[in-house]
Image: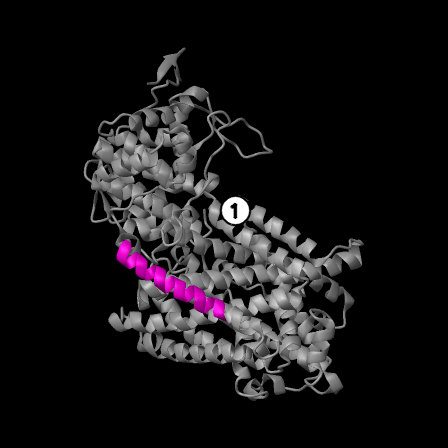
Amino acid sequence: MSPAQTAQHKPGAVSRALAKDRLGIPAVLFFVLAGVAPLTVAAGVIPTAYATTGLTGIPAAFVVIAVILALFALGYVAMARSIRNAGAFYAFIAAGLGRVAGVAAALVALLAYSFLQVGLYGAFGPNAAALAGAHLGVHAPWWAFALGAWAVVAVLGLLRVEITGRVLGVLLCAELAVIVAQTIGGLARPAGGHLSFTTLSPAALGSAGFGTVGVLAVVAVLGFVGFEQAPVLAEEAKNARRTVPAATYTALGMIAVVYAGASWAMAAHAGTSHVMAAAVAQGPGLLFGLSGSSVLSQAAQWLFLSSLFAAALAFHNATWRYAYALGRENVLPAALGRTGPNNIPRAASLLQSATGLAVITGYALAGAQPMQALFFDLGTTGGLGIMIMLAATSAAVVVFFARDARGEAIWARLIAPALAAVLLAAIVVLAVQHYATLLGVAPGSPAAWVLPGAYAAVAVAGLAWGLILKIRRPQVYAAIGLGAHAFTAQPARRPR
Amino acid sequence: MTGQANGQPVPGLGGTGRVADELYLIAHHELTGRPHLAPRAVGLGLAGALLAELLLAGAITVAAGAVVADAPGQADDQLTAAVAAQIAAEQTHPVADWLAFVARTAAGAVAVRLARAGYLAPPPRRSWRAARWVPVDPDCAFAPVARLNAALDLSRPGDGQVVALGGLAAACGLGPRLFLYLPPGARARIDALVRLLGPGLGEVIAQTQTAVDAALLAHRI
């Protein structure tokens, strides 16, 4: 080699060039928070949860769940460093608890994300209808607006257009600013002139009976959904060991403070004993009215819509990613794993759009109350599914590192995930037992067992399918959980 | 087979005989030059194709997942020689790293090479839309698909270069477009022929597929 070439291609030039293209902590954090959609939770989930469950321990639940999720995250980010396709729960579960369990987990996760995505239309529809009626003079039923949002998400999904990082960043900062301003406004004007801390106390969790802990935890977990997405960008991250954990913990901390604060402010402003009635009467207005500023309230209402829309698109993308990865692995029909022009995973995207259309149409025809029956019921059921995934993933982390510690500290590979697994599993059991309270329906009502029962059904179907793959299609079985790496892991399989 | 007219190179239906040139032409519309793939997928496919050219020329090999420059002097044009020199300077990187590295600049570099051979005209200067290289002769730009068709139609052992082209085209996401023009069963035939390729080419094709999939799953395509 000539001296000129040596000088031109100093060792490390390739690594430096690749590192320049990779994502730092802020980029990963924005990606995570965009999926979390803070205003969707603060204005949508929290007031509806106060109204539906009648429980006042929601602020405390956010704090307690944040601690449990931090325990979970210790093992989660440790294992994410050691596996491929770290962007999906089922990959962790396949690597830790076996591929049969992985298939069951994949189907449960797919159903959970699907519930979460479709549920968002139930909030977008009525809130868009109210705003359009009040300010634009456009009067149409909720489902017309829900279908409008659905159509835009479906088209953007097919064009694979994603709201760019900068737009999302601006919207996010605006959302957070509005929530913080409303929170401060609410806390500055407490009911009766005295600021009460009772809803923040862990004692508030069990104030209506120990079982309600599970109900409150599901609501809180629903708020945090999306925090688990950072490993999706693991292979794109600047520093695989630092970027993903740092973004995950920062997101957890921010969400916990913002949600606990907002829900505390709502209870403090309305009065702990009146917050349920206020939530029933005002809905998202419970947040928007905290500061008493009409300009802020207006801005918040429009931002709430953009937040719901961004969340619907983010969860649409999360859902097709699952379906696409499973199609690539041939666990689901291979058609879901194919791309069309411009590398668009058309079938996977259309599948989620078709689900959305069917659900919106079904709820519209049934005349169901969208905010409660669609947004909250399906959303919390999605939250329950994610909680099941969190518990199973924690167990998978423990088993995975029991085989080989891979240099991880005992706290991250055993103690924290084991604690998280036990706590989360207990919460899942409590939540399922008190599902009627969560949905605000009479005990024994069909919705209270059909919705959680759906997970049991797909889990059983997944276990059966996993066993069939193991026996009948060992090549497919061997690649379960590898996602994009399914091909390179198996020399016999080649690109389609 | 590139000809000359008035001292200027003119495109030929026979093509330049280079995998990356052929893949570039397949990946872009023969009339408008508009890409059929997302930008990163084009880059990764062309990066795979440039590595395939070096493998076919005997300039590099893939050993235990890493790319080794055995005889960088075997690279017979400016672009592949530059890639070979980079590989020779940093021998420790796996195939995936080289794909990601070369993908950053591959589309522009291959377009320049095709323009020098007379196949593409430089982008017209229009500020209101993205500059795009346009094929000089649509028939010549479409010819690689016909060549792929001919190679697959005959029940003869596949020519390594055409098979690598087919495999890489499918790997970077051109399958749905390509199979419109190819005989029924072409997908299976390409898969079967790719399996017969040497381990180096097979590895580059599989890694290209993985890189494109991973980019798609990470929303970074």
Query: Residue A493, image x and y in percent?
Result: 28, 46
* Magenta residues, start to end: A453-472
Name which residue type carries label 1: Arg
Question: Which image quadrant is residue A104 in?
Answer: bottom left
Q: What residue is drawn where x is 46% and y is 40%?
A: A340
Tell whether A309 sits left or right of A425: right
Query: Residue A277, image x and y in percent?
Result: 72, 79
Q: What residue is drawn where x is 41% and y is 61%?
A: A106
The residue tagged with tag 1: helix, strand or loop? Answer: loop
Query: Quick one: quadrant of the N terminus of chain A?
Result: top left
Q: Which residue is mark 1?
A: A160
Badge 1 crowding class, 10 Å Cα cut-off, few under 14, some 14 to 19, many 20 or more, is many
Q: Is residue A463 magenta?
A: yes
Rendered position, A122 above or below A343: below
Tell whether B37 sits left or right of A219: left
Question: Which image quadrant is residue B114 in?
Answer: top left
Q: How many marks?
A: 1
Q: Is residue A458 magenta?
A: yes
- What main secondary structure does the magenta stretch of the protein show? helix
Rendered position, A11 above or below A443: above
Question: Which image quadrant is residue A314 in?
Answer: bottom right
Query: Residue A76, image x and y in percent?
Result: 39, 69
